[in-house]
Image (tube, rainbow, N blue to C red):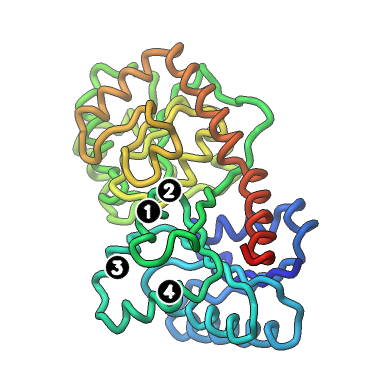
Amino acid sequence: MNVLMVGVGEKRVGGMWTVARKYIENLYFNQKVFLKYIPTSTNGSLLFRMLYMLNGYRKIIYTLLFEKVDIVHIHMAEKGSTFRKGYVVKWSKLFGKKVIIHMHAGPFLQWFYSLTKAKQDSVKKILMLADNILVLGEYWKKELEELIPERKIEVLYNGTKCPDYNAYNIRASNIVYLGVMNRNKGIYDLLTALKQIDTDLDPLVKVKLCGNDLEGDVKKVIEDYGLTERIEMLGWINQSQQIEIFKETMINVLPSYFEGLSMTVIEAMAYGIPVVTTNISTMPELLGKDAYMINPGDIDALGEILLKLSGDSRLRRQISQEEYQRAKHIFSEDTFIKKTIQIYESVLRGE
């Protein structure tokens, strides 16, 4: 099976590259599929990005013309990504190829309805050309059904590597936040909640903030709240650093206002780390309906849950085992890769 995959370059740190890299590096996938990966977007100046895109287009057209391609698997998001990748969709169909659009969740419908009628029609035409559209959860499937027939849409959850056993450290004492730091991710809600519970929280419990401070004032807020002894800012961390941090993580917290499908939550679950997050989009699909989730912006509830979990090791152990098993059976990289191959086979059969 010959697959041309189109996505972003490795300098584009984020969910799209994280998923693409799994395909590129997974041994089983590359035993079953002859994969050619061509990126069309990267970071840098406008001129550099334009030249990078045009070079990607050149490689795609050459591949469609002169190499065997059974399926074109295109990673796409909203806004400019839809229109840029739309050219690839049209060229691929022009050459008679099967096309899969892998939609990386964003505020797609909100963006779509902000467009003019002409641009909305253009977006619909791009989506309708696809043989199959992959979305990151049932939540996003229902959203996209407003635009295209349900039969074209299939849920494919992102996957992560799961240890062979539950690696959760019940003696860990760190509360860890993983992600960029801005209002949309709820970082200021977390800081306010920590300020409210600071005197009741065990002094040994430390909070590690991992990610870039996009608004540039998180450190000042920490100082203003008198939390410098409690909170440490670690900045952006790589994958190996994250694994080391997980070894000492008691609770993972992400009080976000918007998520597509949070890879940091899935990764924490794979290590059996109890997760505290908000009940938005696909979060209930990840954690299950009985998980510890709050309404976005409910600072009091956030503080109460952090206090409760940090002081109850038996409850944390129970949650840990439930989350680990859920991650291993539903959100593992093995499950993700095998389902992708099943989808390829189904598309080639015309189902």
| Labelled pair 1, 2 in contact (Cβ < 8 Å) | yes
Q: Which residue is mark 4?
A: 82
Viewed as shown, does residue 225 lie left or right of 231?
Answer: left
- Separation of residues labelled 4 and 1 (CA atoms): 19 Å
Q: Can residue 235 be seen in the rendering of this structure?
A: no
Regarding residue 221, the answer to whether it shows in the image is: yes
Location of residue 73 (image quadrant): bottom right
Decide: is 214 above or below 173: below
Q: Nearer the viewer, mark 3 or mark 1?
A: 1
Of residue 153 and residue 105, the one placed in the foreground of this image is: 153
Q: Could you tell me which residue is drawn at 76 percent across and 78 percent down? A: 68
The three-letter amino acid code for the residue at tag 4 is: Thr
Residue 74: mark: none
Q: Measuring 49% from the left and 21% from the top, which residue is drawn there?
A: 172
The image shows residue 285 at horizontal and vertical percentages of: 43, 39
> Which residue is under mark 2?
138
The amino acid type of the residue labelled 3 equals: Trp
The part of the image, by quadrant, that contains residue 80 is: bottom left
Residue 66 horizontal/vertical position (percent): 75, 87
Q: Residues within 10 Å of mark 1 (few under 14, many from 20)?
A: few
Mark sitting earlier along the chain (4/1): 4
The residue at the point 47 percent across, 62 percent down is: 103
Check disc 2: other Cα within 10 Å, few if <14, some if 14-19, many if 20+: some
| Residues marked 4 and 1 touching at CB (< 8 Å) | no
Checking the image for residue 142, the label placed there is: 1
Viewer-nearest of discs 4 and 2: 2
- Residue 235, given in percent of the width and then of the height, sits at 43, 47
Q: Which mark is residue 111?
A: 3
Spatial CA distance of label 3 from label 1 is: 16 Å
Which amino acid does the dot numbered 1 rest on? Lys
Q: Cα distance, mark 1 to mark 2? A: 6 Å
Q: Nearer the viewer, mark 2 or mark 3?
A: 2
